[in-house]
Amino acid sequence: MNYGAQLEQLIRYALQEDVGDGDHSSLACIPAVATGKAVLKIKEDGILAGVAVAESIFRYVQPDAVFSAYKKDGDTMMAGELAFETAARVHTILKAERLVLNCMQRMSGIATLTRRYVEKLNGYRTKLLDTRKTTPNFRLLEKEAVRIGGGVNHRYGLYDMIMLKDNHIDYCGGIAAAIGKAYEYVQTRRPGLQIEVETRNLDEVRTVMATGLVNRIMLDNFTPDQVREALKMIDGVYETEASGGINLDNLEAYAATGVDYISTGAIIHQARSLDMSLKAVPG
């Protein structure tokens, strides 16, 4: 399923959750034919994300709704600015309001925090990755917000990459056994699927180097000095990823090692939603 189809599904389920058998507040006091305008007001500085999603929400509810964007996804935003204006049936505006705000506030918070990480990586070759530590049923837009903020999306789910983590390795009886079985699976069942393996210490890195058959090695909870030692052993043969306990305070120390990627769940699960409001434009 492509992004557009996934977004439509998310919008449909989210509206079903919120609207149920009807927006009775609007039905009770506003004529169904009434039309109006509303603007999205920005109330905190940051990186804007979710404008395109907002347009999709309004057009899902009312295909002929008019949507005029004043800013685009990825723009720097400041309190007091307007992000967009929409003109539609009043019932459409009120039905879509909370979903639009929930998506944009959350996405803008993630994009803003991601941008802080990305800016610290300026001048280094290392790229920032997100993780699967996302909100159930909202991963699509959380990962989109990371992309808008300048980060790189890691695997989307369990289906688009083989990642052999500690539990896979322990259940399988060791790193070499897990890699061997994964490689055979890819060759016979899913040709082209990438294989990444998590290592917990330098001995496991040595085992991976002796075994081969992978595309990327994750260095999990390594110190920067340990990452440097591991990179010497790997010597560019495989892509490398540092993960575990990496934050804004120590990010540059890891980037300075020359590791290809740094992954952190913090850019999503520690992001704070930014304040916005959707306000009616007086007729």
Image (cartoon, grey):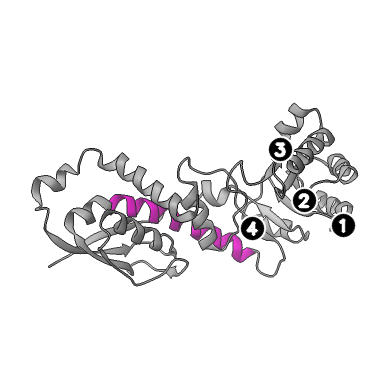
Above or below for 81 versus 13:
below
Residue 103 sits above or below residue 132 on the image: below
Q: Earlier in the sequence, mark 4 or mark 1?
A: 4
Residue 55 in sight here: yes
- Crowding at mark 3 (Cα within 10 Å: few <14, some 14-19, many 20+): some
Q: Is residue 115 magenta?
A: yes
Q: Position of residue 113 (x, y in %)?
A: 52, 57
Q: Is residue 179 left or right of residue 130?
A: right
Mark 3 lies on residue: 165
Q: Which mark is residue 157?
A: none
What separation in Å lies between label 2 and label 1 (alpha carbons)? 13 Å
Q: Disc 1 marks which residue?
A: 235
Q: Amino acid at mark 1?
A: Asp
Q: The residue tagged with tag 3: helix, strand or loop?
A: loop
The residue to which callout 2 is attached is 215
Point out the frontmost of discs 2 and 4: 2
Tag in front: 3 or 2: 2
Which residue is rendered at x = 76% and y = 57% of the image?
A: 259
Q: Which one is in front, 239 or 11?
A: 11
Q: Are marks 4 and 1 in contact (CB under 8 Å)?
A: no
Front residue (pair 9, 94): 9
Give the magenta part as a residue range.
Answer: 97-120
Q: Quadrant of residue 276?
A: bottom left
Give the crowd class for mark 2: few <14, some 14-19, many >=20 residues within 10 Å: some
Q: Which numbered disc flags the more N-terminal residue, 3 or 2?
A: 3
Residue extending farthest to the right is 210
Q: Give the residue furthest to the bottom.
A: 70
- Marks 3/4 in contact by CB < 8 Å: the verdict is no
Query: Which dot, 2 or 1, sits closer to the camera?
Result: 2
